[in-house]
Amino acid sequence: MYIQWKKIIITTLDIILAFYLIMAVTAWNNPDEQGRVCTKVNIEISDSKNAGFLTAEEIKHILQKHNLYPLNKKMENINPRDIEETLKEGPFVKTAQCYKTENGHINIQITQRMPIIRIKSQQGGDYYLDDNGGILPNSKYTSDLIIATGNINNSFAKLYIAPLAKAISSSPLWINQIEQINVLPDYGIELVPRVGDHIIFMGYLPLNRNRWTRNREINSFVNNKLSRLEKFYRYGLSQAGWNKYSYIDIEFDNQIVCKRRDPEAEQKEAEAIAKEAKEEKTKDRQRTEEEEREKARKEVDQQEHAADGPTE
């Protein structure tokens, strides 16, 4: 019987090589955890310096509450998967990754759900929405977000207010200019700006059952309205005055309807401005007189000092 030694040798070498590769990526490549303890926990949270709900201290507290904080524990008793699953249960955590290092460290990386608007509805709801329309519970978060008020239920908030807020937030101009969204009883949308004593009526958001189509149409709707409003701000209000109108209606594409403020209110405002200017002028004059008196006192003191002359 002819033995194919060459084939046997090649097969044997393949088996040895496969065994070596398996050991290289498993046992030989794993750090020796026998007797080693965790000496440091590194917690990284995305956007923690700019915005968000979570801090490294809060992550530590969550793990301590579940007896999973790994510091000073034996590395062999630390299960990264348990840490990940526990953190993912939190309402503000989007993703969580945990892994060990050969020098006895545990690294935890968190991405958080970012709030884009706060809802304070007339029905009593008080919560945040993230950029996907997910509801985040109320917390100590104090960042300067747009606030949405009025006739808002949870469904309308998630399906329509979230994409509206996302579209506004995409513009550096409007994220700083708009401080409040108000939903009227018929679901008309009003905007309250930071600069200017007026209300802006946008009209009614496009309705659509399909999520992607709805979001796209709302984004287009907002960009169109705010583009026209920006031009009106630039070429209209900048000339007429920011407080000339109390209500600006941009619902229709071919016109902007403005309601002038009450003449009596305008008169009172003008008088208040004039009074403030007069008081400021009086204060400036008083400061100038005081400075002149102080200057005169210093000159007299210098003259008296010079008249005394040096003594021996």
Image (cartoon, grey):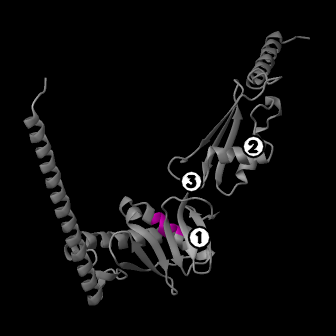
3D distance between C-alphas at marks 3 and 2: 21 Å
Q: Tell me the quarter of the image containing the N terminus.
A: top right
Q: Which mark is residue 52?
A: 3
Whether label 1 touches label 2, CB < 8 Å: no
Picture quarter containing residue 211? bottom right
From the viewer's perspective, tell me whether residue 222 is left or right of residue 123. left
Farthest residue to the right: give it.
Answer: 1
Q: Residue 69's x, y, as percent?
A: 75, 40
Which residue matches tag 2? 83
What's under tag 2, amino acid-wise? Ile
Query: In this rendering, which labeled residue sits more in front, label 1 or label 3?
Result: 3
* Residue 210 visible in the current orientation: no
Above or below for 291 versus 34: below
Above or below for 199 versus 26: below
Query: In this rendering, which labeled residue sits more in front, label 3 or label 2?
Result: 3
3D distance between C-alphas at marks 1 and 3: 19 Å
Q: Residue 2's x, y, as percent?
A: 88, 10
Task: Report the magenta residues as a range.
Answer: 162-167
Q: Nearer the viewer, residue 182 or 286?
A: 286
Query: In this rendering, which labeled residue sits more in front, label 1 or label 2?
Result: 2
What's under tag 3, amino acid-wise? Gly
Residue 163 inside the magenta-drawn segment? yes
Q: Residue 90's x, y, as percent?
A: 70, 54
Farthest residue to the front: give it.
Answer: 312
Residue drawn 79% across the image and 38% down it: 79
Q: Which mark is residue 158?
A: 1
Q: Earlier in the sequence, mark 1 or mark 2?
A: 2
Q: Earlier in the sequence, mark 1 or mark 3?
A: 3
What's under tag 1, amino acid-wise? Lys
Residue 123 inside the magenta-drawn segment? no
Label 3: few (<14), some (14–19) or many (≥20) C-alpha neighbours in 10 Å: many
